[in-house]
Amino acid sequence: MQILVDADACPAVVKDILFRAGPRVEVSVTLVANQFLRTPPSPFIRSVQVPSGFDVADARIVEMAEAGDLVITADIPLAASVLAKGAHALDPRGEWFSAENIEERLTMRSMMDQLRSTGVETGGPSPYSPRDGKQFAAQLDRFLSKYRASRPK
């Protein structure tokens, strides 16, 4: 199991949580972005820089993801792609993407894109809050606890 991070727009607080969690549970954390990212020195943490371009980082994450991996992303189409491969997808706000909710989220995203294309001001997501960081940390901790419990001793 590895943790893959859609790092271009990932909040710094989420990266910091992952930088502590990966080494603690001895799980590889890979940040994928189209820019250089500094990571702390650790055999469990690395970054992969991809060329600039539309969805290049997303395509690399899908390529790297395997069943059972955890992908951190707010990108709904990316979440759908990794779910299709049997990976797990967690939003940086601590909300899980799942087979049960991904179609609804894709539909809502498409509808909002259509509204924006007609000039309707739809607003954006609310600012990332400390509560979001706490919710993310709690969901990650639950996931990693289950992972540790299932690992052979």
Image (cartoon, helix red, strand yellow):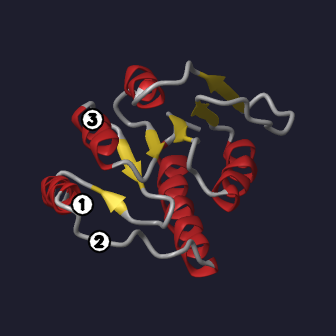
The front one of 137 and 32 is: 32
Q: Tell me the amino acid under the disc marked 2.
A: Thr
- Distance CA(mark 3)–CA(mark 2): 26 Å
Percent position (x, y) of residue 32?
57, 31
Give above or below for 57 relative to 139: above
Percent position (x, y) of residue 7?
58, 42
Q: Which residue is mark 2?
A: 122
- Distance CA(mark 3)–CA(mark 1): 24 Å
Mark 2 crowdedness (10 Å alpha carbons): few <14, some 14-19, many ≥20: few
Give above or below for 143 relative to 71: below
Percent position (x, y) of residue 118?
16, 59
> Of discs 3 and 1, which sits in the foreground?
1
Which residue is at a point 45% across and 48% down the rendered structure image? 73
- Whichever of callouts 3 and 2 sits on the residue coming sooner in the sequence is 3
Mark 1 crowdedness (10 Å alpha carbons): few <14, some 14-19, many ≥20: few
Q: Tell me the amino acid under the disc marked 3.
A: Ser
Percent position (x, y) of residue 136?
53, 66
Residue 66, quarter of picture: top left
Give above or below for 100 relative to 129: above
The front one of 34 and 82 is: 34
Marks 3 and 2 close (CB-CB < 8 Å): no
Q: Which residue is mark 1?
A: 116
Which residue is at a point 57% across and 20% down the rendered structure image? 50
Q: Which mark is residue 81?
A: 3
* In the image, farthest residue toward the front: 119
- Whichever of callouts 1 and 2 sits on the residue coming sooner in the sequence is 1
> Of discs 3 and 2, which sits in the foreground?
2
Question: Could you tell me which secondary element the residue under label 3 belongs to?
Answer: helix
The total number of labels drawn is 3
Q: Tell me the amino acid under the disc marked 1.
A: Arg
